[in-house]
Amino acid sequence: SVFCKKLPKVELHAHLNGSLSTKTLRELIELQKPLSDNSDATWNIWEAIIEHGQKRTLEECFQIFGIAHSLTTTPATVYKATQDVIKEFVDDGVRYLELRSTPRNVPQIMSKAQYIQAMVDAIQGMTDDQILVKLMVSIDRRQGKESASETVDAAVVAYHQNPKIIVGLDLSGDPTKGLVSDYLPVLARGRNAGLKISIHCAEVPNSDEVEEILNFHPDRLGHCTCIHPLHGGSQELWIKLLHSHIPVELCLTSNVKCGTVENYKKHHFIHLFTAKHPIVLATDDKGVFATSLSEEYVLAANSYDLSKEQLWKMTMSSIDYTFASEEEKNRLKQMFMQIKELSD
Ligand code: 5GP
């Protein structure tokens, strides 16, 4: 595990509000208490859920999203949340991070544009020698087409102002709600404006949706849990995924804790890895699921018997799947190679 922590890493699938640590949530509560009209009983319940950490039940895991959202309703708290998460990834050996978040409009307090700007400000506060950070703007498939369209408008404006920071759009949210087909036109609009696209795909079995997503050809895919014939998909869809060569973001702990995958040995990682399909390990929600990117590398190494050389290869190839510029990718590769040479 020391090896995995020291390994320079690339994180490409991390949701801001799911990534908040117990420490950050505690601090946000202290900031919010004097300003809020929550009852003592509400604070006590929230604090108990937050303190459960690793021992949280699945239900509590999902409650954390609601709590985190209630604690990040101003530009100042979004800024703090973003900065804390970035620093924690730095401490874990992450050298390149694409953080994603669903901008929220809080009446009288914060617009979606201000939410995005608060994240950009926090990212600009980090120095390049620690970590390179980019932002992906998420669309929540529960919130409807109109909200998605507003989000893309705000993302495109922010992208023109900060083309080196804002890199893409993500489609996420409850996979059992809403239709992906409703959101593809608005994602296409973002793509035409220059943004890259990553879509959460096949978290639950849904062949028609997988087909639509693959035909859209996003730049990356999240999860792809139920595509292999052994996991509720089909041979035809599986082959279509492999032929697409679209890199897949894999979140081992998140999938096992949510119960969409039975255990680590049965995770679809192994099918994609064996097929030499482009994959990248990711945390998804390091706060909610009490994990870190090094922990995900340890889990992969132990579950699939990977050598140190294979872990190096995985982290190096992840650079190719980032939405960084070619120049940034080359710089990252050189930096990773130097660290490897020093450690050999
Ligand atoms: P936020 O976008 O508010 O920063 O992060 C939390 C949000 O990310 C959740 O409300 C949800 O929309 C999305 N999210 C986090 N984890 C997952 C996941 O595993 N699957 C899906 N589909 N969406 C997720």
Image (tube, rainbow, N blue to C red):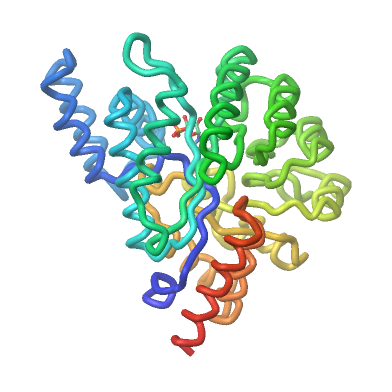
Which corner quadrant holds the N terminus? bottom left
Q: Residue at x 16, y 13 (%)?
A: 37
Query: Looking at the rendering, which quadrant does residue 210 occupy?
Result: top right
| Residue positioned 60% across, 36% down in the render | 170
Residue situated in front as seen by the camera: 122 or 67: 122
Instruction: Specify whether 146 is left or right of 290.
Output: right
Q: Is residue 174 visible?
A: no
Q: Is residue 231 above or below residue 292?
A: above
**Residue 161 higher or lower than 343, as above or below:** above
Residue 250 to residue 192: above or below: below
Seen from the viewer's position, the closer of residues 143 and 151 is 151
In x, y percent, where is residue 260? 58, 43
Seen from this angle, which residue lies furthest bottom?
344
Question: Would you identify the image quadrant in which residue 64 lies?
Answer: top left
Pick whichever, 182 or 238, lies toward us: 182
**In percent of the image, x 62 and y 50: which residue is there?**
323
In this rendering, does residue 184 appear at all? yes
Residue 28 percent coordinates (x, y): 22, 34
Q: Residue at x 61, y 67 (%)?
A: 330
Residue 41: x and y, percent? 15, 20
Q: Residue 228: x percent and y percent?
A: 76, 50
Q: Is residue 22 left or right of residue 122?
A: left
